[in-house]
Amino acid sequence: MLDLPEEVQGVPLTQIKDEMKVAGYPNLRQSQKGFFCDLGYKLTAHDGLSEKQEYWFRLLYAVGLGLVPPELDKVAVDVGSMTGLYALFKKAKQHLKYPRICLSLADETPVVLSLAGPSAAHPNAINVTDGKPYGENIWYGRVNQEGKWSQNTKLPEESLAKVGRLLKHLSESPVATAKKYATLTGRCCFCNKELTEKHSTAAGFGETCAKHFGLHKEWKAAVSVIDQAAQEAQLEEDAQ
Ligand SMILES: [Zn+2]
């Protein structure tokens, strides 16, 4: 199920009914309009709605307000289980107050993931933004713990699709995606500091961040891959 936008939560149901009627049920498709009016009728007849009915009533109101597109199935895209990603954040939370992961699209648009605090409207969800300070940033959407990607539908579909693909890669293989990012930017995918040390460049993150995110083994492994390559190169040279 889609998350209800904050704007439609807590609004009295009778107010929603009146507002939509006056506005002429904007944005709603014919079938949705029928469904909404039917619920509006039930609301008056039974002096209330069941939990499920209320959810749909509010969701269609959100469509009316233009907060959710009428193609409801498009809004929530499964980006795959984010369990790997949550494990990283959980580990990092022991060391860092605000753990983040900084990635970017192929055109170098930054994509930054951060964990919402326990008192946020969507606690423990992963917020996806362009990394700018709150209020100035572009909010792409959020991923909940079930791996549901709720997009900011005000943004163009094309950029949302790109971010969605990046998240999918990240959820499938966090370390490989981090590596790819580092190759692209030369920066640590966690703290965004420039990576100068060759082993960290290979891993996509520095040794300190590796320890914070519980990836020291992977960091070491990246080192050994390089060492191995260097050794092989040396052997080749020696053989010549
Ligand atoms: Zn770092």
Image (cartoon, helix red, strand yellow):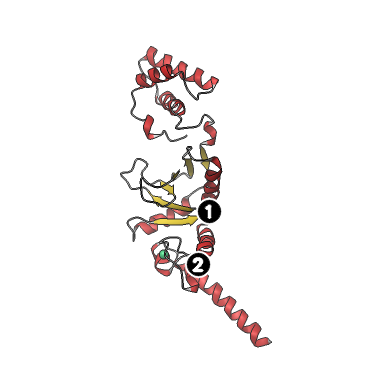
Residue occupying the point 33% across, 48% down: 117
**Mark 2 or mark 1, which is nearer to you?**
1
Residue occupying the point 40% across, 45% down: 125
What number of labels is visible?
Answer: 2
Whether pointer 2 and pointer 1 mark residues with C-beta atoms closer than 8 Å, the reply is no
Residue occupying the point 38% across, 59% down: 92
Percent x, y for residue 119? 30, 44
The residue at which mark 2 appears reads as 203
Ligand 1 picture quarter: bottom left
Residue occupying the point 47% across, 28% down: 63
Residue that protrudes farthest toward the left in the picture:
119
- The type of residue carrying mark 1 is Leu
Work out how far the residue at label 2 is from the one at label 1, CA to CA, in angstroms. 18 Å
Q: Which structural element holds mark 2?
A: helix
Q: Residues within 10 Å of mark 1 (few under 14, many from 20)?
A: some
The residue at which mark 1 appears reads as 105
Q: Is residue 197 left or right of residue 124?
A: right
